[in-house]
Image (cartoon, grey):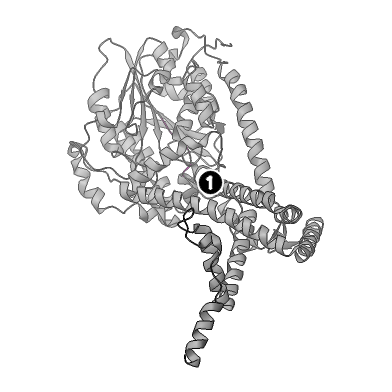
Amino acid sequence: MSTRESAGVEAEEAEPKPPAALQPGPSRPFPRPWTACSAWIRRRRAEHPAAVEALSVTVTVLAAALVVAALVMPNSVGQLEPSQFVRVPAEAVIGAAVMIALPRRPRVVLAAVSGVALAAMTVLNALDMGFKQYLGRGFNVVLDWSLFGDAESYLEDSLGRTKTLAAVAGVIAVVLLLFVLLALSMVRLSNLLARHPGIATRGTLVAGVVWITSSSLGLQLSGVPLAADNTATALKAQAHLVSATLKDEAEFRKVAKVDAFGNTPGSQLVPDLRGKDMIFTFIESYGRSAVEDPIMAPGVDSTLDARTKALAKAGFHAKSGWLTSATYGGSSWLGHSTTMSGLWISNQQRYRTVMASDHMSLTDAFKKTGAFDTVGVMPGVQKGWPEQKWYGLDKVYNAFELGYKGPKFSWSTMPDQYTLQQYQDRVHSKKPADGKSRMSFLILTSSHTPWAPIPKMVGWDQLGDGSVFNGIEKAGNPASYTLTDDRHSKEEYGKSVQYTVTALTQWLERYGNENTVLVFLGDHQPNAHVSGNHASRDVPVSIVAKDPKVLDKLANWNWTDGLRPAHNAPVWQMSAFRDRFLTAFGSTPHPKTN
């Protein structure tokens, strides 16, 4: 045998055999996967020690960065700055101290559980960001889960089903990945601390001293405190919110049972409006920003002034003021129900409570007089609407009952001009068979986000079944035009408000009569992409009539003449409108308490 052959045999004999756990046998035909993986890693480490060490360090650094980023992550878009992520989190210091002291098994379990909990808080922070950006408030872990279905429907209407499904799948995948990565990162870091207890202890002490010193002296970096306790603060805030929400439910049930006009006989409700053609109309997302923002206001104000003059030529006059909405950026039904109930309905729990109660709505007050038929026109309703009973509406026309054959405009099922013409043809042009007057409740939707594409006015005699809007919709901007650009959002939102105001007031010119009384208002401000992060919740409200006696009843309200409320016009809570309106038109209070 040659020398080389002898060396080869010796090398083969010198190579260590796999552990018994990796050797096939009658009781273990295949190796355990995790043992095989560990063996593979050991071999690679032996073959490429420098590369494996570099990879290990990189993974550890990334794990630490992910954990720290999650711990110091703010819960609002406005605070997403680099300086927020170079802070010293108190939770990391305390967590490190605990991990160093624990034995292996409880340490690993605690690390994994802590990673999952941190991932959950990170998701809640992200939800807070989104809710503050779009709804002007944080996410409520008790009440807001039901809104995800509405959000998905909105995306599907705006982007299409395929893109929406892809987006939802992507979000779910990212969330699951976040939970896995944070759990693994926490375990890895805890193992690192356990392997180097001396260095870990000294480092933890130093970090603790830095945190205490920074907190005591108020040290800052680019205006941001160096000492952070974001996660603990967020957890405390969520616990307080849950407690307050549960407490609010019980308290609001008591409030909803009290009604200043709950026992008023029908004969004593709105006697000064008998014989009138009453119309209550909400304009989607019509807020103060439309009238005062430097980008939207020039076009909107010009339209309001021009339409005021046009109505005056037709014999109509208006008074306008401001109402502070119970919602912002969305959840329009909260604004509708707050206005009509006289209660502050600022969340879904309160909404459900009122809808299940016998608290009288303003629209139901007209029904209770026995002198009005009541009807609703709801182009945004595409499923069962049990709220009809609470609103006291004899008949409701939803999106499928208006004969529309044209295209949707993103979320909006049909243009407002078409809705108004259908209201005219199906309802307003027909007198009630029993000789009563009529009270109508309309929700106009063309100014609903994302404001692209938006419809344009066409000849009233050209509306037909709505097919005339096919070309307008195709020529309009895609939803992405406003979803990705705040300037575009502002411009297109302003145009959508101009469109709806024009359609509504032109309808009034064409079809209003001596007895018509139109009340129209916004349900809430548009989201922060349009109104800004610190916008008020005010919305314009106008009352329009030909009969001067109607507006004379509002003389002590000090509202502005015309459709455009002055900047310093009175501002009321939206919940104050019902009782003020009932009182102004002669209703007699007869309180109801249970």
Quadrant of image for the C terminus: top right
Residue 274 position by quadrant: top left
Residue drawn at (47%, 88%) of the image: 5
Residue closer to the observer: 67 or 381: 67
x and y percentages locating residue 162 in the rendered image: 31, 49
**Residue at 59 percent of width and 65 percent of height:** 62
Residue 394 vertical placement versus 37 (above, below):
above
Q: Which residue lies furthest to the front in this view?
A: 1
Q: Name the residue under label 1.
A: 127
The magenta region covers 520-526
Examine the rendered structure and indicate whether residue 193 appears above or below residue 348.
below
- Measured as percent of width and height from the top left, residue 27 is found at 49, 53
- Give x and y (percent) for residue 127: 53, 46
Q: Is 120 inside the magenta-drawn segment?
A: no
**Disc 1 element:** helix
- Residue 325 at least partly seen: no
Identify the residue shown where x is 51% and y is 79%: 12
Q: Left or right: where does residue 292 sit relative to residue 76?
A: left
- Whether residue 132 sits left or right of residue 429 in the image: it is right
Is residue 525 located in the magenta-colored stretch of the structure? yes
Q: Is residue 231 visible?
A: yes
Give the residue type at disc 1: Leu
